[in-house]
Amino acid sequence: MDTECDGYSRFESTRIVSARALQIAMGAPLLISAKANELDPINLAKREFEQGLVPITIKKKKPKKIE
C-alpha cells in the first residue's frame, strides 16, 4: 500500500483497512467486485482502500503556527 500519496501515515491507513475489514467480516456490502473464491476480508479491504472507495475518513487537526 502506498500511503504517501494518500496523505495517511502507515498507522492511519492500517486503522482504516482494519476497520473496513471488520465491517466486511460482519456482512457489510462490498464496494468492489470480488470473485466467488475471494473471501478474505483483509485483502478485500486493502483493495477497496487502494482504489479510494473506503467510506472511512480521518480528521486531522492542523498544528498551531509558532511565530
Image (cartoon, grey):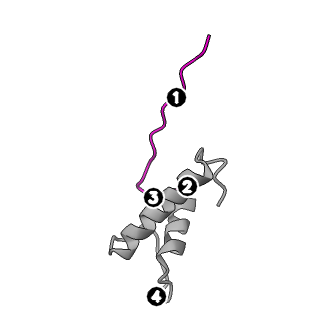
Would you say residue 51 is visible in this rendering? Answer: no
- State whether the magenta stretch is mostly helix, strand or loop: loop
Return the residue at label 4: 36
Vertical side of 65 occupied by 3: above or below:
below
User: Residue at (39%, 72%) from the top-left corner?
Assistant: 24
Query: What's the residue at 41%, 55% (across, down)?
Result: 55
For the magenta stretch, what is the residue range?
A: 51-67
Q: Are marks 1 and 2 in contact (CB under 8 Å)?
A: no
Residue on which disc 1 sits: 62
Q: Do the residues bearing badges 4 and 3 touch, measured as CB atoms within 8 Å?
A: no
Point out the frontmost of discs 4 and 3.
Answer: 3
- Element class at badge 3: loop
Which disc number belongs to residue 13? 2
**Element carrying mark 4:** loop
CA separation in Å, label 1 and label 4: 43 Å
Q: Which residue is mark 3?
A: 54
Does residue 20 appear in this view? yes
- Which residue appears farthest toward the bottom when viewing the image? 37
**View extreme (front): residue:** 66
Q: Residue reaching furthest left?
A: 27
> Picture coordinates of residue 26 (x, y %)?
33, 74
| Picture residue at 60% right of the left edge, 48% below the top | 9
Kindly state the secondary structure of the residue where label 2 is placed. Answer: helix
Amino acid beneath label 2 = Ser
Q: Relative to 37, is 16 above or below? A: above
User: How would you rate the neighbour count of disc 1 (Cα within 10 Å): few for under 14, some for 14-19, many for 20 or more?
Assistant: few
Point out the tag, 1 or 2, that comes first from the N-terminus: 2
